[in-house]
Image (tube, coloured by chain):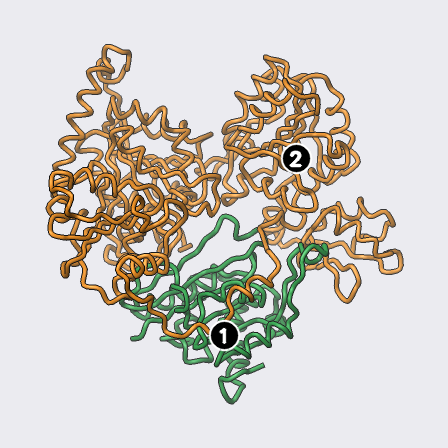
Chain colours: A green, B orange
């Protein structure tokens, strides 16, 4: 298979590490060589968080080289842009449209681009993107906490992953506490459906 | 993290996705450890945390020790009785433990003793990026360095064997990217554990008075020379690729970047990967290096391998070009990555940097337009409440010496508390020194776990020498920054059972502090008053600000099925003065459509904003 590099970016507390581990566990189950990088310590404190999932025979390093991301899974738009150096115009962008405003912005000490500006950047430079309101999907599934898994579901609707939704369902069963399995699988499936409801991959928004 | 029970699986040949840290834990279990000790510290914490979760079931004694030197001493005590023991810490923790470790090299051990040092190139969550490989030659101890989770597991098992065979503690060095990268690990079988130990006295070996220490030093040098023979022939030091006219010497995580960079540039190259980095396999390296005109040394931080390679190759003459730190091939600070190594190699070899696209995206311009998002104190964090009270009661007239823990995040606006941060416990000592030479009140801010770890000698110094310092102990019932590990003040042990709780204010009282006040930081008025009184007190004072970590409290509530009742803005009373936002900076308070709102999903109901609001416009939902 071709190497597959997935970069997951977002804000501490969004469940980025969990999504990365779900992807890694699914890859291992399907017999692939895989590396999942996770930097924690600061991860729960509302800071920027980025995680890499790298699948492929010749993968050694934990992190994606610049320009080599096949997928940017942005759980938050500002953070998706922060790690833009890992992408190329061929990178598939799968991005949550819910901005989480940094405290510096709330306090009036820093400015943030608007969602429209972010969307324009993505449309200008990338060939393929799916921009979706993960909060809406998560609330439909039953909890704002599953935006991450809903976004994973959206990613599953593309051809980017070397495995399908069944492997991810199984990794959810392995990684999530029993009482939350149904909620997470529901979010995954809603994401899959939402991602798949667009007719072409180019700019679903 | 995998379910902790996976680490006890008896099915050898099973494959699991493990972090380097979990892999070390599994390796220690396979090696049949009886005792595990640690002081938590990123990036090492999950080794001990995973063992703590299964300790009772596995029959392993696990403890979170008061600090790293105690952790090594406890593990060494067990090892001297003949059982295997593991001790884990972050790189700077080894500074604390080094006093014990260096003399333990003289006495040697009996059961295998492995000391893990998890280094942090790039300072992801540390105050320095010191390179602990140098502890190996300093202490004359062997040091192994894995490059991925499988090696972390396999080599942990081997390290116990090596330690036991030569009766020496062995250092096991990882870095953040090895400790925190998940990769497939094939399990091995679990060795039967020796349950009971016995200390057999041997005064000349174990009592390091000068006469005996001199002799033991020579014994140590003999041991390390014998281990050098092991290192020369070990399969852990191996040539993984053999072709072309360029040679690479590397180890640990840098090996991964090397392999990908060689691939990206399509080079014909040979790679010598070192797993045992001390004692250095000089002959093996000399033989390898002698085959090439150009040798590239790929390593993070200091030129440890580079200098050893140069020493090994010195008899070969000067025809070999060694590319490393001193030649400017790679930087001497920060982490490496595939990109950094590829670009550095391309420059040295005068090759174009391969890109799969022309640069059409203005990366720097886009990144430059983004607001910063540093880690901050969480919604409802009791430290925010304490810091607000400090600001309110002492204004700008004080110097705040802070310490290692979440509360270091207090430096962010708007609270901006923290003028000095050095290492565990340094806040107290430094504040004492400042108080002697300047008039302004000096404050030492120290967390609960940090208090037990390193602040007590400083506290005694303050009492003994009558330093006018205010020591604020932020007691949130956890070692929060590293993952909520228990500590002496929680009264819960690493085995997950109740121990005896050590009470901070009783320790302070026992040390002779006369002005002690315990406050609940969520009670703003009480806390402000306590700081005012401490400010005017002429000697050392201690304020214990006690409130459970808000993340932990929320987690526990959720587990009990209790609902958190958030606060809300009363629109008709709110005049948009933004006091709540501007003095607290709580991430639960935001501005939406030009109105102040409280995010009910984030609010923990701490009530501090309601006490701060000048218009009484915040109330419970």
**Which mark is drawn over residue A93?**
1
Which quarter of the rendering shows the C terminus of chain B? bottom right
**Left or right of A89 in this view: B231:** left
Q: Residues within 10 Å of mark 1 (few under 14, many from 20)?
A: many
The residue at the point 71 percent across, 37 percent down is B521
Q: Relative to the observer, which residue lies in front, A121 or B510?
A: A121
Identify whether B166 is placed above or below B151: above
Q: Is residue A74 among what the camera can see?
A: yes
Residue B211 appears at what percent x and percent y?
23, 10
Identify whether B611 is placed above or below B515: below
Chain letter of disc 1? A
Residue B173 appears at what percent x and percent y?
32, 41
Chain letter of disc 2? B
Label 1 residue SS = strand
The residue at the point 75 percent across, 49 percent down is B582
The answer to which quarter of the image holds residue B520 is: top right
Which quarter of the rendering shows the N terminus of chain B? bottom left
Q: Relative to the observer, which residue lies in front, B381 or B305?
A: B305
**Left or right of A140 in this view: B414:** right
The answer to which quarter of the image holds residue B56 is: top left
Closer to us: mark 1 or mark 2? 1
Residue B366 appears at what percent x and percent y?
56, 66
Q: Is residue B5 among what the camera can see?
A: no
The residue at the point 22 percent across, 39 percent down is B308
Q: Which residue is mark 2?
A: B546
Label 2 residue SS = strand
Residue B373 appears at what percent x and percent y?
59, 55
**Left or right of A44 in this view: A24:** left
Q: CA distance from mark 1 to mark 2?
A: 45 Å
The answer to which quarter of the image holds residue B370 is: bottom right
């Amino acid at each position: 298979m071709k190497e597959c590099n997935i970069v997951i970016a977002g804000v501490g507390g969004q469940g980025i590490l969990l999504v990365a581990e779900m992807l890694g566990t699914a890859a291992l189950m399907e017999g692939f060589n895989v590396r999942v990088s996770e930097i924690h310590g600061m991860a729960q404190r509302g800071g920027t968080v980025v995680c890499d999932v790298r699948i492929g025979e010749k993968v050694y390093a934990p992190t994606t080289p610049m320009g080599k991301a096949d997928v940017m899974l942005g759980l938050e738009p500002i953070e998706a842009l922060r790690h833009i150096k890992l992408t190329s115009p061929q990178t598939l962008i799968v991005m949550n449209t819910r901005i989480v405003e940094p405290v510096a912005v709330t306090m009036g000490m820093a400015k943030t681009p608007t969602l429209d500006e972010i969307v324009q950047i993505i449309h200008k430079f990338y060939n393929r993107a799916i921009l979706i309101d993960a909060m809406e999907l998560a609330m439909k599934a039953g909890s704002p906490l599953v935006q991450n898994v809903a976004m994973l579901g959206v990613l599953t609707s593309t051809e980017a992953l070397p495995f399908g939704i069944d492997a991810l369902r199984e990794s959810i069963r392995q990684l999530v506490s029993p009482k939350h399995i149904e909620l997470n699988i529901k979010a995954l499936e809603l994401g899959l459906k939402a991602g798949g409801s667009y007719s072409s991959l180019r700019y679903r928004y | 993290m995998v379910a902790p029970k996976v680490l006890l699986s008896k099915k050898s040949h099973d494959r699991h996705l493990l972090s380097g840290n979990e892999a070390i834990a599994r390796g220690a279990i396979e090696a049949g450890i009886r005792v595990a000790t640690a002081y938590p510290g990123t990036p090492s914490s999950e080794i001990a945390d995973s063992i703590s979760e299964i300790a009772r079931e596995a029959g392993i004694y696990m403890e979170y020790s008061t600090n790293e030197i105690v952790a090594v001493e406890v593990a060494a005590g067990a090892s001297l009785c003949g059982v295997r023991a593991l001790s884990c810490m972050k790189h700077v923790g080894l500074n604390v433990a080094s006093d014990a470790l260096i003399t333990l090299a003289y006495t040697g051990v009996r059961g295998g003793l492995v000391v893990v040092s998890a280094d942090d190139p790039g300072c992801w969550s540390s105050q320095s990026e010191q390179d602990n490989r140098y502890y190996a030659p300093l202490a004359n101890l062997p040091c192994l360095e894995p490059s991925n989770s499988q090696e972390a597991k396999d080599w942990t098992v081997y390290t116990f064997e090596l330690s036991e065979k030569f009766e020496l503690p062995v250092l096991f060095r990882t870095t953040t990217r090895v400790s925190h990268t998940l990769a497939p690990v094939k399990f091995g079988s679990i060795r039967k554990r020796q349950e009971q130990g016995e200390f057999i006295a041997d005064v000349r070996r174990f009592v390091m008075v000068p006469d005996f220490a001199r002799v033991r030093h020579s014994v140590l040098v003999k041991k390390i020379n014998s281990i050098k023979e092991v290192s020369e022939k070990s399969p852990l030091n191996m040539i993984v690729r053999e072709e072309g006219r360029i040679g690479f010497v590397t180890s640990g995580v840098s090996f991964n970047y090397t392999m990908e960079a060689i691939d990206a540039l399509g080079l014909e190259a040979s790679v010598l990967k070192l797993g045992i980095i001390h004692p250095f396999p000089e002959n093996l390296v000399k033989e390898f290096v002698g085959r090439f005109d150009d040798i590239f040394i790929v390593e993070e931080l200091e030129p440890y391998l580079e200098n050893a390679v140069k020493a090994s190759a010195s008899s070969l003459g000067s025809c070999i070009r060694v590319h490393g730190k001193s030649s400017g091939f790679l930087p001497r600070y920060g982490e490496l990555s595939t990109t950094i190594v590829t670009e550095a190699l391309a420059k040295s070899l005068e090759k174009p940097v391969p890109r799969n696209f022309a640069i059409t995206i203005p990366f720097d311009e886009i990144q430059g337009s983004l607001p910063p998002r540093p880690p901050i104190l969480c919604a409802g964090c009791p430290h925010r409440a304490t810091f607000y009270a400090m600001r309110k009661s002492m204004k700008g007239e004080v110097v705040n010496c802070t310490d290692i823990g979440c509360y270091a995040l207090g430096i962010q606006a708007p609270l901006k508390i923290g003028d000095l941060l050095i290492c565990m416990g340094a806040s107290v000592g430094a504040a004492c020194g400042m108080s002697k030479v300047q008039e302004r009140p000096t404050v030492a801010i120290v967390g609960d776990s940090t208090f037990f770890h390193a602040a007590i000698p400083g506290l005694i110094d303050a009492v003994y020498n009558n330093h006018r310092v205010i020591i604020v102990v932020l007691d949130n019932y956890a070692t929060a920054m590293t993952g909520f590990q228990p500590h002496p003040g929680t009264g819960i042990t690493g085995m997950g059972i109740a121990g005896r709780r050590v009470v901070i204010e009783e320790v302070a009282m026992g040390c002779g502090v006369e002005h002690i006040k315990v406050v609940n930081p969520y009670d703003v008025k009480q806390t402000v008053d306590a700081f005012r009184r401490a400010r005017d007190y002429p000697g050392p004072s201690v304020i214990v600000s006690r409130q459970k970590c808000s993340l932990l409290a929320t987690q526990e509530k959720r587990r009990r099925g209790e609902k958190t009742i958030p606060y809300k803005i009363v629109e008709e009373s709110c005049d948009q003065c933004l006091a709540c936002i501007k003095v607290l900076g709580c991430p639960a308070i935001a501005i939406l459509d030009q109105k102040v709102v409280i995010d009910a999903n984030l609010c923990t109901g701490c009530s501090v904003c309601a006490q701060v609001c000048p218009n009484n416009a915040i109330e419970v939902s």
